[in-house]
Image (tube, rainbow, N blue to C red):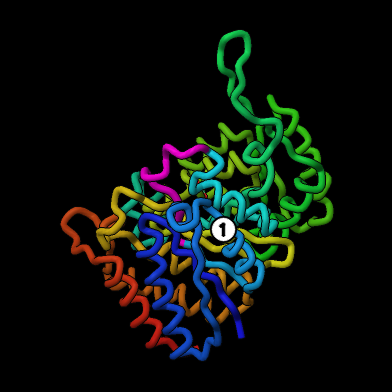
Amino acid sequence: MVKLLILPGDGVGPEVIAEAVKVIEALKRRHGFACELDYGLIGGAAIDACGVPLPDETLSKAQAVDAVLMGAVGGPKWDQMPREIRPERGLLKIRSALGLYANLRPCFCFNELAAASTLRPEVLQGLDLLIVRELTGGIYYGQPRGIVQEGGVRVGFNTERYSEPEIERIARTAFDLARLRKKHVCSVDKANVLESSQLWREVVERVAPSYPDVELSHLYVDNAAMQLVRAPRQFDVLVTGNLFGDILSDIGAQLTGSIGMLPSASLDAQGRGLYEPVHGSAPDIAGRGIANPLATILSLAMLLRYSLRAVKLAGTVERSVKQSLASGLRTADIARPGERVVSTSEMGTAVVERLYEQEI
Ligand code: IPM
Ligand code: MG
């Protein structure tokens, strides 16, 4: 029996998670998916209930399950809190405590949605790239860090650091994934300025000969950002560090028409993982039932594929999402002016209905 931990979190998190849970229930009833759900607190919800963004109970539950499905964390209510107990801290801590170093953020354009992007549809038709972001190192975690007094002024500082093994393992993840795709890895760094990037590039180069069937190229991050909006279809797998990956994956999200469409997986060396939509807690629309649940439902599909190796079930969920879009259903974020808009739960229900129609 598969065990999943559900962490709804804050903002639109609980709303979009509720739709993913509907999908899980449908997989159980219609497709014989045997799983047990447990729930936990993270982020602002955890701060309100227990004073910390990642209670020990949540972490030990997460360590005991096959995979974790999360909504989102954060919101203005907790923005003024000290950094150590802000909601985002809970997310950073669970990533690090579970060793989830490989963050997979696929960006693909459903052709039905090409018109929803701010870029021209012909630039996006057929887009299918994968950002592989290193998630437990780099400047997010590097020491020393802090804000100090120096000669009467305050100075804030952080440390970007990557060790050879950290770079090597994420490079191998990227090459392995490229083998299942178009066999091209583009490594993104700032090796013209930063020593950490210089080492990054050296190590990626050193790993490359073990994958003679995969082509490797390099881009500086500023150029990569430009290329992503200029001609995004040139990319297959992009591999990069924590901060660059954070930034580039928001660009990637916008390419697909809406950040409301993008799933993500954060994996450890054994393929255990945490799955979450890229969109975050969206406090401005929380509680109104209008958030797009598809990124979370697609995150569930990634969970089925990567942690449970239930490839057929994953395909069924993805097909149901595609069919819902093809039938014209649009949440507010992906609707064009004049198009009828459905609510979060109408979209979830539509996916569930398609799921019941599928044979696997
Ligand atoms: C993301 C988010 C997080 C990050 C925040 C919420 C800490 O932006 O997952 O991309 O910076 O990693
Ligand atoms: Mg981000």
Residue lying at the far front of the rendered structure: 50
Q: Is residue 250 left or right of residue 244?
A: left
Q: Is residue 348 left or right of residue 153?
A: left
Q: Is residue 118 above or below residue 213?
A: above
**Quadrant of residue 61 in the image?**
bottom right
Q: Is residue 310 above or below residue 334?
A: below
Q: Is residue 126 left or right of residue 35?
A: left
The segment highlighted magenta reads: 71-82
Nearer to the camera, 199 or 143: 143
Nearer to the camera, 251 or 270: 270
Residue at numbered disc 1:
55
Q: What residue sits 62% from the left and 40% below the top?
A: 140
| Residue 71 seen in this snapshot | yes
Q: What residue sits 50% from the left and 71% below the top?
A: 39
Give the total of numbered labels.
Answer: 1
Q: Position of residue 156 (x, y in %)?
A: 58, 23
Nearer to the camera, 82 or 180: 82
Q: Position of residue 139 (x, y in %)?
A: 65, 36
Residue lying at the far left of the rendered structure: 338
Is 74 in the magenta? Answer: yes
Q: Is residue 226 left or right of residue 171?
A: left
Q: Position of residue 9 (x, y in %)?
A: 44, 59
Q: Position of residue 269 (x, y in %)?
A: 74, 62
Is 211 in the magenta? Answer: no
Residue type (three-letter) at the residue carrying disc 1: Pro
Residue lying at the far top of the rendered structure: 151
What secondary structure is found at the residue carrying circle 1? Answer: loop
| Residue 237 seen in this snapshot | no
